[in-house]
Image (cartoon, grey):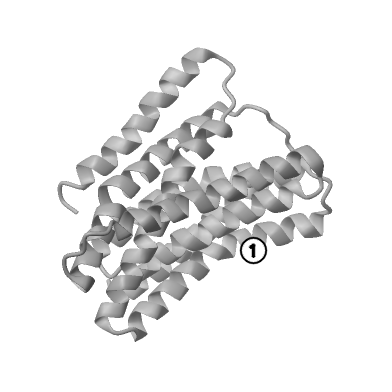
Amino acid sequence: MSLVLYKALAGLLIFITSLVSVIYPLRVHTHPTHHRLLEMGDALASGIFLGAALFHMLPEATMAFTSALGEIHYPLAELFCAAGFLLLLLFERISNRSNAHDGIALPYVIALIIIIHSLIEGAALGVNTILETASIIFLAIIVHKGSESFALAITLNRSKLNRYHVWSLVGVFALMTPLGIAMGTILTLFLQNQTSQLLTAGFNAFAAGTFLYMSTLHHINHHHRVHDSEGIIEFFVFLAGLSVMALLALWA
């Protein structure tokens, strides 16, 4: 299978997962405050996100910058990573401010955070020219996409938005990761080798920062536990996801 075909299939699977995951909460208008299976699934996905960022994307971004620019003494990969982390932190702060002052704006801000993250993660998959790395990023995305879609649907259900606006936001969200994959793939096909390396390095490092944010602060701020014991179970599920990525780093 060619890498371009693999990315096309990955985009299609992510798109289908995004839509399927919102059907139940949007159709039955459910308003759960706690969903244990969803919480555990999100913990696993967050561990995979953290491992993908630390064990794969950030080290590969560092190597790509070195390959394209030679020995550099400035931590460019870490700079891009910090920028990705801070961007989502900024939007999260805007979301909290909207929650306090304007409940109508809140669903739009939350949707914007998730949409931007989806576009970035798709671009990170698209610009990668190595099948193993693209597969690791795809795994991190697809595992997290279901719980992310479900959470977005619950937030939109609780808002005062009409059904047209809700489904419009869901549609844009579902398209963002495939669009990012397409954009990244097209850019790498037409750019020169050094430029392509720099683009891949920059997107990998920037996306690693967003992955770090989603797996740490976002994960902590958006989980609801009924019992303290669930926090321990959730931690080991999180650790399992992280361990999978650590083991994959031995071969990828």
Residue 124 drawn above or below residue 248: below
- Name the foreground residue: 158 vs 38: 158
Q: Position of residue 110 (x, y in %)?
A: 66, 48
Picture quadrant of residue 68: bottom left
Q: Position of residue 163 (x, y in %)?
A: 81, 54
Which residue, given by chain and number where applicable, does mark 1 sit on? 172
Amino acid type at image mark 1: Val
- Residue appearing at x 59%, y 17% in the figure: 226
Residue at the far front in the pictured view: 73
Residue 185 drawn above or below residue 218: below
Regarding residue 91, the answer to whether it shows in the image is yes
- Residue appearing at x 39%, y 64% in the figure: 203
- Name the foreground residue: 6 vs 74: 74
86 displayed left or right of 62: right
Q: Secondary structure at mark 1?
A: helix
- Residue appearing at x 63%, y 43% in the figure: 93
- Residue appearing at x 53%, y 46% in the figure: 146
Q: Position of residue 99 (x, y in %)?
A: 74, 40
Q: Quadrant of the C terminus?
A: bottom left
Regarding residue 27, the answer to whether it shows in the image is no
Picture quadrant of residue 189: bottom left
Please count the marks in the image: 1
**Are there few (<14), some (14-19), or many (20+) residues within 10 Å of tag 1?**
some
216 displayed left or right of 112: left
